Image: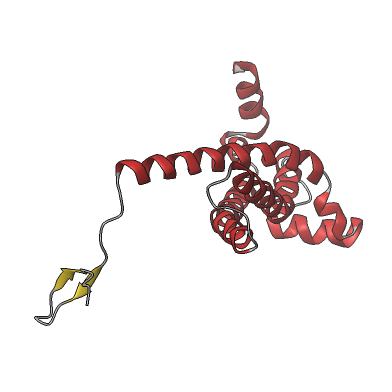
Amino acid sequence: LGDAFADIYRTEGASGFFKGLPAFASRVVVASSVQLSTYDTVKAGLVSAGLRAERASTHLAASLATGAAVVLAMQPFDFACTRMMNQPSGGPYSHVGDVLVQAVRTEGPLALYSGVVANYARFGPYCVLVFLFLEQFRSAGARFFPARPALSTSAAGGAAPAVATSG
């Protein structure tokens, strides 16, 4: 490992350690945004279609769909990241957009999705584990920290606990 660091520093200088970082940062932003927004949306859709919210099979299906959405969204950025990190100093690409435009122009748009199956084989199981554990934590949290009554506005203008009355 030390030899690798020394070789990078010798051939590319300190900037060699950061090659591909903008593409990687873009990838993380896209992946996290899609992952965090997709799971609960897909799960709600599955529940409204008749699946039970507390079932592991519902969580599994929502997790797998989320993994597919994440991979489809981040694959072009993974592609760009790989190209930027593998290019020699002063290589043909100057930024993420440059990689994407050149690849589409010379190889076609499907080139951006080369490796998508391998990426899903890695990311799909990751999503399943993350969201199955998340659901277990949600379940445990609900047992240990039951929901509090909703607050309503009282006549005096302050917040007061909502109390159900029987009539």
Q: Count up the numbered dots.
A: 0
**Image quadrant of residue 118?**
top right
**Quadrant for the N terminus in the image:** top right
Nearest the eye: 52 or 118: 52
**Quadrant for the C terminus in the image:** bottom left
**Image quadrant of residue 128?**
top right
Q: Determine whether, in the image, residue 121 is placed left or right of residue 136.
A: right
Question: Where's residue 82, x and y in %?
Answer: 73, 42
Nearest the eye: 68 or 9: 68
Residue drawn 81% across and 43% down? 117
Residue drawn 72% across and 41% down? 89
Question: Where's residue 23, x and y in %?
Answer: 64, 50
Question: Where's residue 113, x and y in %?
Answer: 81, 51
**Image quadrant of residue 158?**
bottom left
The answer to whether 88 is drawn above or below residue 23 in the figure is: above
Residue 95 visible (yes or no): no
Nearest the eye: 73 or 67: 67
Nearest the eye: 126 or 128: 128
